[in-house]
Amino acid sequence: MSFKETFYTTGENLLKKIKELIAEGNVTKISIADKNGNEIISFPATIGVIGAIFAPIIAAVGAVAALLTECKVTVERKGPPTDKDAESTEFGQTNE
């Protein structure tokens, strides 16, 4: 079972948020879109456990962050949603 969450954030906070999501461990896929919903980049988060492979993705996310003022991050997580996942965050979270 998996579920999706959507976060809205600014470009300057994007890299920090992606790193936090990867560190949580239950994220399987991350998609980043502009404020109009046009997907910019999408990648499987499971590769984050291998630092050498993950470094270019972090660089790409940093480049995307520099171009975007506002963006939407969609996160696919494994397992059922928990109460913690339903809480709001500073990024304006919604569960799908």
Image (spheres, helix red, strand yellow):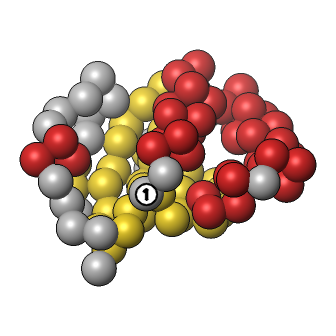
Pick the quarter of the image with the C terminus: bottom left
Measuring 62% from the left and 30% from the top, which residue is drawn there? 15
Snapshot quadrant of residue 11: top right
Q: Is residue 4 left or right of residue 27?
A: left
Which is nearer the eye, 65 or 34? 65
**Amino acid marked by disc 1:** Asn
Residue of label 1: 26
Q: Is residue 43 left or right of residue 6?
A: right
Measuring 53% from the left and 64% from the top, which residue is drawn there? 29
Residue 7 image offset from top left, x and y in percent = 35, 42
Please determine whether, in this image, residue 91 is positioned above or below residue 53: above
Residue 21 image offset from top left, x and y in percent = 48, 42
Which is nearer the eye, 54 or 15? 54
Residue 34 appears in view: no
Residue 78 image offset from top left, x and y in percent = 37, 68
Measuring 33% from the left and 50% from the top, which residue is drawn there? 6
Q: Is residue 17 left or right of residue 8?
A: right
Pick the quarter of the image with the N terminus: bottom left
Residue 29 appears in view: yes
Please determine whether, in this image, residue 22 is positioned above or below residue 40: above
Measuring 80% from the left and 46% from the top, which residue is drawn there? 51
Residue 16 image offset from top left, x and y in percent = 57, 26
